Amino acid sequence: MGTPLSATAAAQAPGLDVVQLGQQLERLAGDLGIEQWDLGAACSTDTSVQVDRGEAKQLKGAQRSSITVRVWNGDGLVGITSTSDLSKAGLARALAGAKEASAYGNANDTPAFSPLAGAPLQPLDQPIQEPQAILSLLTTLKEAERDLLGRHAAITTVPYNGLAQRASERIYLNSAGACRAQQLSTASLYLYARAEEAGRKPRSSGAVRLAYGAAELDIAGCIDEAAELTISHLDYAPIATGYYTCVFSPEAFLDLIGAFSNLFNARAVLDGVSLSNRESLGDSLAVPFLSIHDNGLHPGNIGASSFDGEGTPVGRLGLIENGVLSHFMHSEATARTFGVAPTGHAGLGAKVSVGPNWFEIGSGATGGGAQGLDRHSADGVVWIDSLSALHAGVKASQGSFSLPFDGWLIQGGEARSIEAATVAGDIRQVLKALVGFEGEAKVTPDGLCPHVWVEGLSITGDA
Amino acid sequence: MVVSPPLAKVQLDPFDLSWRSRLEAVLASGRAAGASLVEVFLESTDHIGLLAEQDNITNVSPAFGKGAGIRVFLEERDGFVSTNDLSERGLMVALEQALGMLGLERGSSDSSRFDGLADLRDYGQSKQAWLGHCPGLGEATSRLLEGTALLERHGQHLQARRGSYARDWQEVMVAASDGTFARDIRLHQSVGLNALAADGEHRASQGRRYGSSDRPDDLRQWDPNASAAEICASAQAMLRADYVEAGSYPVVLANRFGGVIFHEACGHLLETTQVERGTTPFAEQVGSPIAHAAVTAIDEGLSSGAFGSLSMDDEGMEPERTVLIENGVLKRFLSDRAGELRTGHARTGSGRRQSHSFAAASRMRNTFIAAGPHSPADLIASIETGLYCKSMGGGSVGPTGQFNFAVEEGYLIKNGELGKPVKGATLIGEAKEVMPRISMCANDLELAAGFCGSVSGSIFVTVGQPHIKVDSITVGGR
């Protein structure tokens, strides 16, 4: 049996009664003869609004709770069950289900408790904001929509919009006494406008903002960006198929790196579906002026978690440093296989998933790459603002991609929107074909990144 | 074969007539507060997911849950609240929140605005035993391992072999203040195999997923040998394939999952949610030609065992067979309760949602282009230089009707015959432009199971078509 759970945890997570939950689990597990277990639980309260041309379209609220219990049976095999039923009966069913599933646990790859599940966590500056009344959110969004519609006569609707806020808690407990809890409040705003001029095709673009509360959202900035981008796509032309130097926006490059994060994923390496293998650490993967870190604790990461699904502290990890593959992201099980420490990138499961938290992309300490890059004075360069359909157009285990994008062709310093086009390539070639970085790194929902210049990418257009 | 008991049978409280009074209290309270209409959606779920890698079962992930979604309309506006708390108090709290979103409050004693629920239409009564008839963990894991072993037998240069199985059981009850009172049990199973072939720098991954509804024996009837053979042949063909040359070509799209082109390029634009948003170019086109005369397209929820079939939709309405396009002319939109209210298009039994956390929306079910008079060979023979898309991946459609989807297995067409395999193709275009270019339909209509993510979450759907020819489409490549 594990150490009695600390009463101080309850104060950290008032919505989920951590002490009661832990004690219930201990009793129920004892009844079923389960000596080793752990648990991840989360609950949240969400409210959101959508509007349509000055009217409320939908107002939505949700109370959600979920729990995943994991048990080790007498043979050391692991089973899990998840449920949204946090009643005593629900927990009992979940434990029984996990025990039944453990009979089919994988003897060749059995997770254990993270050795860091009790290690100190780095403090996060995440102010908890009081939620606003939903009718107040509605008023705010109506005003934002009206403002955006008034920016240009061609902007006739904002078909995709939403203002949402969430209060959430998550916990991790295990039978060895580990106890993690975190509370969070977040808010988001997205505005995607549709514009159409007579005799021309409709065009669309938008912007997103995140904050710890609705009152902190940069609403004016979101409207400005959505309007600017949408208007910039009104004057469009087809692009000729060919090879171009491309400038990726921070958001687009982060999307691309995220889609190929199996390069750094120890789980994918062990499963044989990564572009890397166990001997790849130390390989030169990119131009020497590229560094990629994963840093879930960056202050710009709204909604950061201080611990992962196994209770391991989240931290900053170098993935590519000065062009060289330096570390993999790990769960407890993959770290044990590699003989290293878990890195704070795990989920919770019988087979534990591994994934990135928040990327920092830029030049390493050594700097380098072409200097003084300026897309606004470029010629024959494609500026890729956003990539689409990554779920369909990325072959992560093959390295290739072919993706529709929104962007502009810059000729003689003048940017003109591209009607419809795809960009295709291989991520390994992209990482070797970086020309340099432009401007300061920008904080986005997925990470920190400057504009990134890449040469020789295949663009397919209609011209 | 390992013998085991069936998968865990979760004894959640069943949705039966004992719920009537509780639901009527909620509905009456909402109507008395001034709501035009109140709807309660109750849900109980029991899921199992299995993963096999190489020759091991590496993940068994059961999940179960329950919840309710309460939607309140005040004329055309609506508020929606979901909760995991199905107690009387929990439902009333959710109702109060939904009412509050519309500026309404509980408290009125005017009970004359609700006439009570109709007799229960119980589509689930005959389905009570389905869960017990599904394969147990031992049987299911054995079938998956049989599949990954067959990949090894049929394949060459295989670096990774995977099999996955999911069984989703769902009990739902819908009650609305217009008297709607209905219950159903749904069962969806899907099984898939994937293989990654690697030889030096050459890599190819291929997969196939099969799915059905309402057939407890489906995993037992699955043919893993045929699946494995098809996947390995495809992976072998694509392993050393060259990248397709970018450009605009005539293309032939194979049947079954080729239907994703209609789903993405046109189907979504025929949902009333798109009419509401003003994002479909077809909003005012009913009765007008929007496609080539060769195209007749249908959406229905009736095909036996198909992934997108339903006994009732998530608003308690029986699904219809909806002819969307007939000989190129737009006939109908897919509509749900809100769509009917806001656009005037009559409901089609298409109100669907992933779970109680989502309000229902007009969504596709089994959507396909009808068979035509030609043979598949006729279509290939009609093209001098083009592309044959034998296997399609996923796709999407944007807010201006631009669609895209990936080609998993493609072959060049030269002088009316299939040529070498090519990879890396993405087809892009706009619905208004591509629909008139579907000029030939073959006589080999087949359906394929898929998942569709949209405004009301991820749902089970079927896409389908015969082989079709598109006269010209932009092919992204290198």
Image (tube, coloured by chain):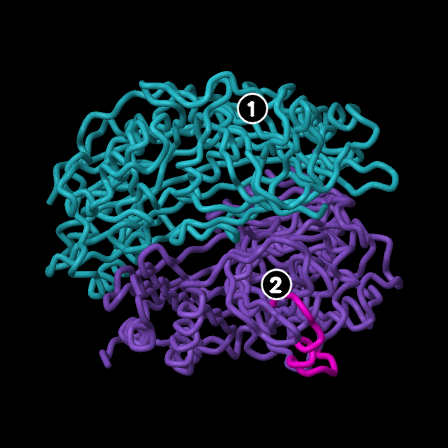
The magenta-colored residue range is: B371-388
Q: In this view of the protein, can residue A329 be seen by the observer?
A: yes
Which residue is found at the position 30% from the left and 52% from the top? Answer: A91
User: Judging from the image, what secondary structure is the residue with disc 1 in?
Assistant: helix
Identify whether B293 is placed above or below B180: below
Which chain can be seen in cyan? A
Where is residue B39 shown, x and y percent of the image?
A: 65, 53
Circle number at residue A214: 1
Q: Is residue B82 magenta?
A: no
Where is residue B131 shown, x and y percent of the image?
A: 41, 73
Which residue is found at the position 47% from the left and 60% from the top? Answer: B44
Structural distance between the alpha carbons of marks 2 and 1: 39 Å
Which of these two is toward me, B325 or A124? B325
Check if mark 2 and mark 1 are on a common chain: no
Where is residue B1 shown, x and y percent of the image?
A: 24, 81
Which of these two is toward me, A364 or B367? A364
Does residue A2 appear to the left or right of B321 in the view shown? left
Quadrant of res B413: bottom right
Does residue B44 appear to the left or right of A405 in the view shown? left
